[in-house]
Image: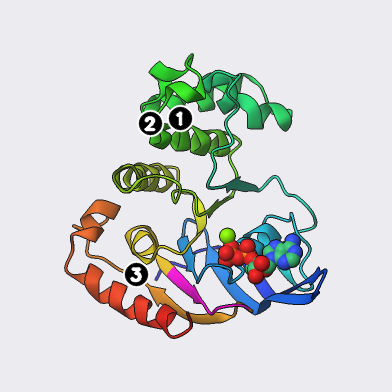
Amino acid sequence: MIHLKTILRVENICKTYQAQNGEIEAIRDISFTVDEGEYISIVGPSGSGKSTLLSIIAGLLEPSGGKIYINDMPVQGVTQDIGYMLQSDNLLEWRSIWKNVLLGLEIRKMLNSETIEYAKSLLKNYGLYEFKDKHPSQLSGGMRQRVALIRTLAVKPDILLLDEAFSALDYQTRLKLTDDVYRILKKENKTTLMVTHDIAESICMADRIIVLTKRPAKIKSMHTIDFPEDAKTPLQRRNHPDFRHYFNTIWKELDVHV
Ligand code: ADP
Ligand code: MG
């Protein structure tokens, strides 16, 4: 029995927004832990509090109650340990792909020969090096998201947060991209927390799925996703007979609350 290290602890997180027309309770008492190298997906209906939860984990938003620990250290404000990727790739058009990839390192004052080499190796390994002098608008949507991922990985975050990172893309692009992203994240052994409303995407990528109720979000259930050795990539998982079983189970869980 291998004992994995717990990297993230989410303890009794609550969040109530003070809005103009009263309070909005977004999250009620959410707790879970994530082990190093695990890929967790959080699914929940639209407006259930998924982005709120990620923002709290990233230290961008104060919870109303509860605490987040990364490597046993309480999160206070924005932390270097976390890489955050959103639906929009946020690439800067006036910078080349290479300069975009270096942006995170630049902002964190981490530019040195070692980090530059690492950024370069990521671009090379993941088929984007030949595009390094292009500008974002010259790349396809899927390529841009891969550039955004590489920019995020270049600073070597301990935990990667993905907020509906693929949902702006068309179906074909998304299938290809999720395969690429999965490969990259497994190879770099990243701990990943992805939120999405897309059940299929969750089943394709995650080791574990956390289902949230509608607002205020609570944990409805947790599911371990375990495909046989010959169905490990997202595309193989989609075509595996077990896929349907997982889909139906999680669909029902979500359905009750929509
Ligand atoms: P999801 O990402 O699951 O779609 P969000 O976390 O974005 O949901 O939002 C959860 C709920 O909190 C929604 O009802 C939303 O309207 C509300 N909400 C989000 N941000 C704010 C805010 N800054 N002020 C007030 N209410 C907010
Ligand atoms: Mg959201």
Instruction: Tell me the kind of residue under disc 2.
Output: Tyr
Identify the secondary structure beneath mark 2.
Answer: loop
* Disc 1 residue type (three-letter): Leu
| Residue drawn at point x = 41 percent, y = 32 percent | 143
Label 3: which residue?
225
**Image quadrant in which you'd find residue 105:** top right
Residue 211 is a magenta residue: yes
Q: Which residue is mark 1?
A: 122
Q: Secondary structure at mark 3?
A: loop
From the viewer's perspective, is 73 left or right of 115? right
| Spot occupied by residue 57 in the image (x, y as percentages of width and height) | 67, 60
Question: Residue under circle 2?
Answer: 126
- Label 3 amino acid? Ile
Residue at position x 60%, y 44% from top? 157
SS label for mark 1: helix
In contact (CB < 8 Å): disc 1 and disc 2: yes
Classify 10 Å Cα crowding around label 2: few (below 14), some (14-19), many (20 and above): some
Q: Quadrant of residue 225?
A: bottom left
User: Front-most of 113 and 238?
Assistant: 238
- Counting residues from the start of the chain, the first of labels 3 and 2 encountered is 2
- Which contiguous range is marked in magenta? 209-215
Residue 26: x %, y % from top left: 68, 73
Above or below — where is 249 with respect to 113? below
Q: CA distance from mark 3 to mark 2?
A: 26 Å
Question: Which color mode does the image show?
Answer: rainbow
